[in-house]
Amino acid sequence: MSYSQVYAASLKDPAAYWAEQAQALDWFKAPSTALMATEHGTYQWFSDGELNLSYLALDAQIAQGRAEQVALYYDSPVTQTKEAITYQELLARVERFAGALSGLGVEKGDTVVIYMPMIPEAAVAMLACARMGAVHSVVFGGFAANELAIRIDDALPKVILTASCGIEFDKKIAYKPLVDKAISLAAHKPKHTIVCQRPMLVAQMDAHRDLDWYAFQEGAVPAKAVPMKGSDPSYILYTSGTTGQPKGIVRDVGGYAVALKYAIHQVYGMRAGDVWWGASDIGWVVGHSFIVYGPLMGGCSSIFYEGKPIRTPDAGAFWRLISEYKVNSMFCAPTAYRAVRKEDPQGELAKAYDLSSLKWIFVAGEKLDSSTYQWLSELLSVPILDHWWQTESGWPMTAPMMGWEDPSLPRLGSTNKPIPGYDIQVLDAEGHELPANEAGHICIKLPLPPGFAWSIWKNNERFKTSYLTDFPGYYHTGDGGFKDDDGYVFITGRTDDVINVSGHRLSTGEMEEVVAAHAQVAECAVIGVHDELKGQVPVALVVLKAGADIEPQDLEADVVNMIRDQVGALACFKRAIVVSRLPKTRSGKILRAVLRKIAASEQYATPSTIDDASILPEVEEALVAAGFISLVESSPSA
């Protein structure tokens, strides 16, 4: 069958299509029902089936003869450490750790927060939680204590799993003090913190709360996989919310398992025994879906990399890994390749390695610019495949189907065609479907396919208002764009206040709350501006209080430190520009869309709702003085 035939069949009878895909899994109890509506307007998949993600990732693979195959290649140039962990070895570690958690009283349905660097113990922790039915919530190690505290109070974990430190290039970042501070800030106090001590920086332990990672496992009874209902939650993953309050995306077990098995084979084209590299971090959805669960469920060997694309030791780090481990395909955000290109413009370092194992490269997380695409294509001579998905989706929404005999060809500027099961439509503000090549709101008609988030942790109503209310009958992605005559999807950018910084989605609204807390600031707007390396970076436009006595450079230093302390260094927040006023509508709303256009030197129309149009030239002048734009480039179109 052709793509068009399969895609049409998946939309005509989604329950039948996905029930067929579900047969690829090793169920403890096969589901009798594929699709079922929830009370809050979404859908659950395979709710009465019984299975376990850890079992599918480990036990089932061993049963198929992969006991001695490498499950995880751990490569840490920042610590000069390498390890090849077989499926059998990984299972033993996971069984023991799950048993030790059980010995602490962690039970099915309890929550566990994981705040760890990219070390094998982090993967063990995730798989152990899944094995015993605990709901894990991985928090990216770059988040500050305040952000961790917010997540602790929302998830209410019984224990926190952490390490003594993470490493950024040659800098050791102490994790334990951040965890301790987060616990002191949080209203909820987890019973235990389990600490993996790393020799390069040993943490001080609290005798009443802290346990050593290895010592607490001594004598633990290895745990068998607990049968989970398809509708049971597998994990919580917090994503930026437009209100500044993170949203705890909830992923189920059954639909997620079906989606990952389908994706690793059909979307990414991987087969059992292949070597796959998701070049990301477990703190993000890529790490969950395509560093840990997906590749292992597909019988692949997955790269677990603790390092950066450059300075570890040089900009040839990616090429070394591809050559050394015979990587067949990889996934990465364009930011990483831009960093490599900046350090090695001619790609000379790649010539030192045998990259013949590489079949194709997937990119996502932010817009793939044409120059990076061309550079990679010429350097590697393999297909460079843009695709699109979100934390909420959990797996790709548009992509070429590389597991098929006739995958759709890449098209520059497009993230490719919708994957079967995703009824992607472009709507106008009133919810009417737009014709080809006309830009609007990108939405997905319900029901959403398996693997998609079905709620926000303990807040069904927020899921409904965040995603399902603006366009009834559809999931609103928050992205704008269009489809061309052939059905290819083009993403033009976010329609809310979430920006992509190095492929990480961050809320400008959250940063505004931090900046506004400065004693000298009357009001502010944080916008994302283009950055050649990181894609976007946040910039604050700040109005000072009357009589404020502070130099602009001192204010900037203050708010940069505040963002670093309360959001984290990953925000890459470095600029705060003082302006006299901010443009607003007559009802008092800040015109952020116009500010973004001014900062991008784009033509803009003066909104009819603006209260005072004379403010716009003032903002332009401030941005010119700061070196962002020139007055010649930025001017209104009306």
Image (cartoon, rainbow, N blue to C red):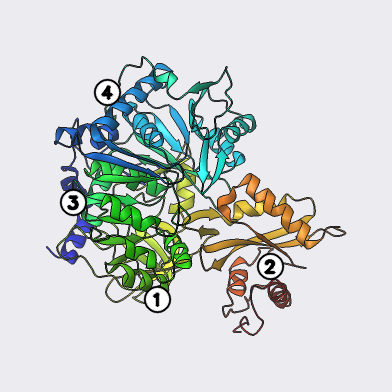
* Image location (x, y in percent) of residue 285: 40, 47
Disc 3: which residue: 17
According to the picture, the residue beneath numbered tag 1 turns out to be 438
Q: Residue at x 61, y 51 (%)?
A: 510
Q: Is residue 140 left or right of residue 34?
A: right
Q: Earlier in the sequence, mark 2 or mark 1?
A: 1
Q: CA distance from mark 1 to mark 3?
A: 30 Å
Q: Tell me if 587 is positioned left or right of 300 in this view.
A: right
Say what amino acid the circle numbered 2 marks: Lys
Q: Amino acid at mark 4?
A: Lys
Circle 3 SS class = helix
Mark pair 4, 2: CA separation: 59 Å
| 204 in relation to 350, above or below | above
How many circles with numbers are drawn on the protein? Answer: 4
Residue 355 place in picture, x, y as percent: 27, 60
Mark 4 lies on residue? 224
Q: Is residue 621 left or right of residue 490?
A: right
Q: Which amino acid, by three-letter code, is at mark 1?
A: Glu
Q: CA distance from mark 2 to mark 1?
A: 28 Å
Q: Residue at x 44, y 63 (%)?
A: 340
The numbered mark at residue 93 is none
Q: Which residue is mark 2?
A: 584
Rendered image quadrant of residue 252: top left
Q: Position of residue 418 (x, y in %)?
A: 29, 62
Q: Amino acid at mark 3?
A: Tyr
